[in-house]
Image (cartoon, rainbow, N blue to C red):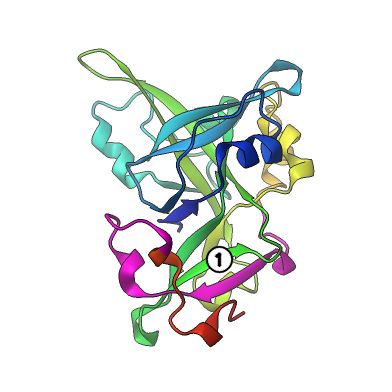
Amino acid sequence: MCGRFLVTSPGQRIAEFFDLLEVPEWTPRYNIAPSQEVGTVVGLPDKERSFAVRRWGLIPAWAKESSIGNRLINARSETAAEKPAFRSAFAKRRCLVPVDGFYEWSPRSRGHTPYCFRHRDGEMLAIAALWESWTAPGGGEVESFALLTTEANAVVRRVHGRMPALLARDQFDTWLDPENDRVPVLQRLLVPSATPWLKAQPVGSFVNDPRHDGTRCLEALRPDQAGLF
């Protein structure tokens, strides 16, 4: 499961990393939680890409109320193409969520310490996701998304058994292609990321509260614990 992440890069860096048509407006955020609005990248014809803000927590088009999205923040990559809540989006509405890192918490038996996972070289990361459009009973459209997860790689496994499905830049076109509905091809992308990509840093309890934001969320427990593994 992935229940918290950060997007601290400015719009210019996001646009360059994802080859966007325009530079998005984005204020750095260090503690993004479910139900909040987040930037996503979608594919357009001719391999062009655009940036759109959507709510985290997918609301299926057939849902009677939006609260179902509170339970659908993640989708298991192994089964998403078959599940009623995600099946249509997997075939037609895939996106990427630009992040600079994500958080996972160790089991309570080991202190329930939060860890921040980031790229070892400071690059941005791209989480594979699915988006959907829902029409509220009283009118109005709500666009929302769910992050895809996969089995944890060797780094994340020391803290949690699942991790976000991270894609490399040379996989973006395949995932975002709106004409690509080849499920086996798409599912082959959703595997644990290469272990050398990531480093883990234990951080303080400040990040536990989703109302908190700012650089304090990334403060290491001790200076010598930065990039612990």
| Element assignment for label 1 | strand
The answer to which image quadrant residue 53 occupies is top left
Nearest the eye: 19 or 155: 19
Across and down, in percent, residue 17 comes to 69, 41
Is residue 141 one of those drawn in magenta?
Answer: no
Does residue 78 appear left or right of residue 103 in this picture? right
The answer to which image quadrant residue 163 occupies is bottom right
Which residues make up the magenta segment?
A: 191-215
Across and down, in percent, residue 4 comes to 41, 56
From the image, tell me which residue sits under label 1. 117
Across and down, in percent, residue 26 comes to 48, 37
Whether residue 198 is visible here, answered yes or no, is yes
Across and down, in percent, residue 166 comes to 63, 52
Amino acid type, callout 1: Phe
Give above or below for 197 relative to 73: below
Does residue 140 appear left or right of residue 20 in this picture? left
